[in-house]
Amino acid sequence: MMQPSGQLNRSKLSNGQDHLRTKILQFGEGNFLRAFVDWMVCEMNQKAGFEAGVTVIQPITSGLVNKLNAQDGLYNLYLNGIRGGKFIAQRSLIDVIQKAVDPYEEPQVYFDEALNPDLKFIISNTTEAGIHFNPEDKMNDQPASSFPGKLTQFLFYRYRALPECDRLIVLPCELIDKNGVKLRETITQYIKLWGLEENFSAWLKEKVVFCNTLVDRIVPGYPGEKVEEYWHELGYRDELIVEGEIFHLWVIEGPEWIREELPTEQAGLNVIFTDDLDYYRTRKVRILNGAHTSMVPVAYLYGLDFVKEAIENELVGKFVHKAVFNEIIPSLGGDRDELEQYAGEIMDRFRNPSIKHELITISLNSFSKFKTRVLPSILGYYEKEGKLPELLLTALAALISFYKGQRSGEEIPLKDEPRVLELLSSLWKNHDGSAGSVHNLVEVILSKEEFWSTDLTKVPGLIQSVSDKVVKIQEKGIDRLLQDLM
């Protein structure tokens, strides 16, 4: 077996990509962007003649810039997953990053990137908290602390230096709703705070397009225990190896002409350009996230610990499948065949043997997740079908039982908002084991408008149906309830 020698760099491994023009400024050097956006750029370069390079900007004071520069921006990406019932594994050498910059150490190098006439795209993933306004930031900071503050400085620098430049397309990948709108609004706050000239605001409207986006790919990241095996396979050390699932989806809401600037279709990428992202966000939240949130309390109380275990278990897997296809999808509008195809892809993703997704991890803040991910399907199904969705109500009953905090005599490590934990703990402590006590407990929980933004006790039959299921879980176990339902 070949022993790994040295790190990966362009002198060690010729890749022929030194000619790339830097068309993309990327805020963020973490696993997700490198396994998602940079991989897509690499695919477009190879299959669609995109010829785009990336300059990476480290958004916070610590990061991977030094490692990226030490490897000349090169790293290996391992993708795997199930597609069409078959397990697929791929390795790619990602070679699009031309330079990585720490703006805290080299602020002028960062600002000089604004002088690049080839720059076309600004992409970011600075976590959900990254798009925020810090009133302490100043225009003459080197640089501003927040990501929107840094970007405002950068765009103002470009406005002054290249006022007649081509339009810039901003594609934030932060996992917040209306991320493009939110970023633009935050930049507007900085313009007002810093008293920047009105012509700059007019230039922004003309020259910079902020798109809302939705991204989807599970990226476990650095392989940890498998890295030595990979190094031996490669024959050299790669300190930036990334693992991800083979599934990917990028939805971009913006003007139609953006499709021409980003040749994703020619590269065979799963990128959707739309003028209305809401449908795709709703689809993801209700089907993918809704399946996760419905699955967790049911599967965990059944005695399972991982998503793959749950989906492959005969009884729990059947429950999840039926909940998605028979109740969640009917609650949605849209093309039934397209929704079922999407749901089928999700079931394959859940079966991915390379991703160990712990149920207890997904259970974080389950009450708020249930409100946004599952409750709309319950109410939508009731409105469309005129009856209650028994499987989704089983998930609700399991959720309430889950917050009793016990599984087979062992304590469940519950993590949620204090108000949720305090209420559920108090209710279960005062529960006397009778069906009437369960009914009262369920009624109190469903009446909490601060949990659900509505009084669920007003939905006909909901209290009784959920109470009956909680009673059965407490007396006979979740497995008996599932057997009866299936």
Image (cartoon, rainbow, N blue to C red):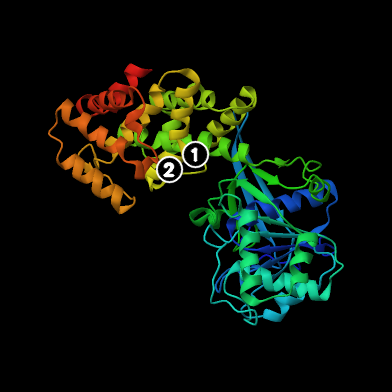
- Which class describes the residues within 10 Å of circle 2: few (<14), some (14-19), or many (20+)? some
User: Image quarter for residue 277?
Assistant: top right
Q: Nearer the viewer, residue 367 or 56?
A: 367
Q: Nearer the viewer, residue 365 or 279?
A: 279
Q: Give coordinates of residue 39: x percent, y percent.
A: 69, 52
Residue type at tag 1: Asn
* Left or right relative to 407: residue 232: right
| Contact flag, marks 1 and 2 (Cβ < 8 Å) | yes
Q: Which residue is mark 1?
A: 289
Q: Give coordinates of residue 232: x percent, y percent.
A: 60, 56
Residue 4's tag is none
Q: Which residue is mark 2?
A: 369
Residue at x 62%, y 42% (from the top left corner): 246
Which residue occupies the extreme left position in the image?
Answer: 432
Above or below, 75 against 461 in this view is: below
Sequence order check, earlier mark of 1 and 2: 1
Q: Nearer the viewer, mark 1 or mark 2?
A: 2
Q: Give coordinates of residue 483: x percent, y percent.
A: 33, 19
User: Image quarter for residue 304?
Assistant: top left
SS at badge 1 = helix
In this view of the protein, can residue 49 be seen by the observer? yes
Above or below, 402 against 110 in this view is: above
Residue type at tag 2: Lys
Q: Nearer the viewer, residue 373 or 223?
A: 373
Residue at x 44%, y 29% (from the top left corner): 379
SS at badge 2 = helix
In this view of the protein, can residue 232 be seen by the observer? no
